[in-house]
Amino acid sequence: MIELGFADFDISGAMGVFAPAGTPREAIDRLSVEFMRAALLPDVKGGMARDGFVVAPTGPAEYNAFIRAKTEQIRSIAKAAKIKPD
């Protein structure tokens, strides 16, 4: 990616959970707390680390910002490469 002019490109990914539009905020907040708690359990965190993952749970706002930034990054790469969606 550096050779293509994208020196700050980050190829890392993320795992997350999505909810349907209109899901009540209280439900999203509760799910977020429980997923973060589960991700930090020693067995879960250790298993993920053993598989090469860095466990760094975030809340809905942070994950949304990450997804938006990653989407824009990929969009700019596709545009520079003149890739058009089918």
Image (cartoon, rainbow, N blue to C red):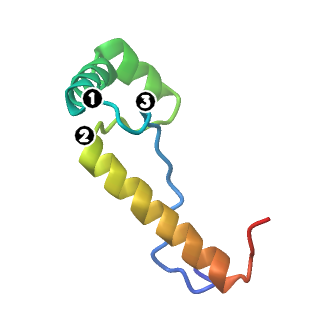
SS class of the residue under badge 1? Answer: helix
Q: Amino acid at mark 3?
A: Ala
- Residue 67 lies left or right of residue 41; in this view the side is right
Q: Residue 8, how many percent across, how many down?
A: 45, 75
Q: Please give the label number shown on residue 32.
A: 1
Foreground residue, 15 or 71?
Answer: 71
Q: Residue at x 58, y 80 (%)?
A: 2
- 10 is higher (above) or lower (below) than 15: below
**Mark 3 vs mark 1, CA separation in Å:** 20 Å
SS class of the residue under badge 2? Answer: loop
Q: Which residue is mark 3?
A: 49
Q: Amino acid at mark 1?
A: Ser
Foreground residue, 60 or 56?
Answer: 60
Q: Looking at the image, is mark 2 or mark 3 nearer the viewer?
A: 2
**Mark 1 vs mark 2, CA separation in Å:** 6 Å
| Residue 55 showing in the rendered view | yes
Q: Amino acid at mark 2?
A: Gly
Instruction: Name the outermost residue toward the front.
Output: 22
Q: Residue at x 26, y 24 (%)?
A: 27
- 31 is higher (above) or lower (below) than 2: above
Q: Residues within 10 Å of mark 1 (few under 14, many from 20)?
A: some
Of the residues under marks 1 and 2, which one precedes in the sequence? 1
Q: Residue 21, how many percent across, how many down?
A: 41, 39
**Mark 2 vs mark 3, CA separation in Å:** 20 Å
Q: Which residue is mark 2?
A: 59
Q: Are marks 1 and 2 in contact (CB under 8 Å)?
A: yes
